[in-house]
Image: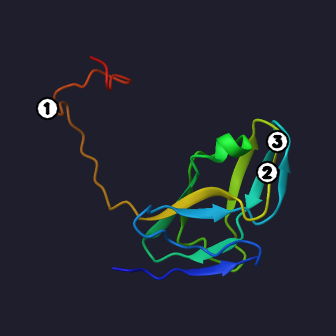
Amino acid sequence: MTKTIRVKYFTDKIERLRCIDGKSDWIDLRAAEEVELKAGEFKLIPLGIAMELPAGYEAHVVPRSSTFKNYGVIQTNSMGVIDETYCGDNDQWFFPAYALRDTVIHVNERICQFRIMEHQPALLFEEAELLGHEDRGGHGSTGKQ
């Protein structure tokens, strides 16, 4: 079922959002301003959009796989979560960037991506003495023989 998401653009300098049919279910976000960062500096990079997400949904925002390689920045919160209540006319999305080297990010460059996810369902936690499954070997054991 297709969902409609209303998007407000804060600038005409960035490409409009679009889904890439059959290639990815992540959607690219772009820098809405030119940003210069020195090594060790933090800035919120405006993404030039606000959205009205459907009720019961949230957006997960993460760097593109090439963001660190191309710009030497990391996202300070590892993954941003934007829920459907962040939908006011001035609720612009931002990318919180920490620079590990001097860099310039130009307007309209793709720096992060997002996808829309349903909220976690209601959960009930039940305490148990045993879970009754085979141990996998502890933290960091995956792939070790």
- Mark 1 element type: loop
Question: Between marks 3 and 1, how big is the CA–CA gap?
Answer: 49 Å
Q: What residue do we see at 58% from left, 51% from top?
A: 64
Q: Which mark is residue 28?
A: none
Q: Which residue is mark 3?
A: 41
The first of marks 1 and 2 along the sequence is 2
Quadrant where the image shows the N terminus:
bottom left
Residue 58 visible somewhere in the drawing: yes
Q: Nearer the viewer, residue 122 or 7?
A: 7
Residue 48 position, x and y percent, is 72, 70
Q: Which mark is residue 132?
A: 1
Residue 61 position, x and y percent, is 56, 57
The first of marks 3 and 1 along the sequence is 3
Mark 3 surroundings within 10 Å by alpha-carbon count, few (fewer than 14), some (14 through 19), many (20 or more): some
Q: What residue do we see at 79% from left, 36% from top?
A: 101
Q: Which mark is residue 43?
A: 2
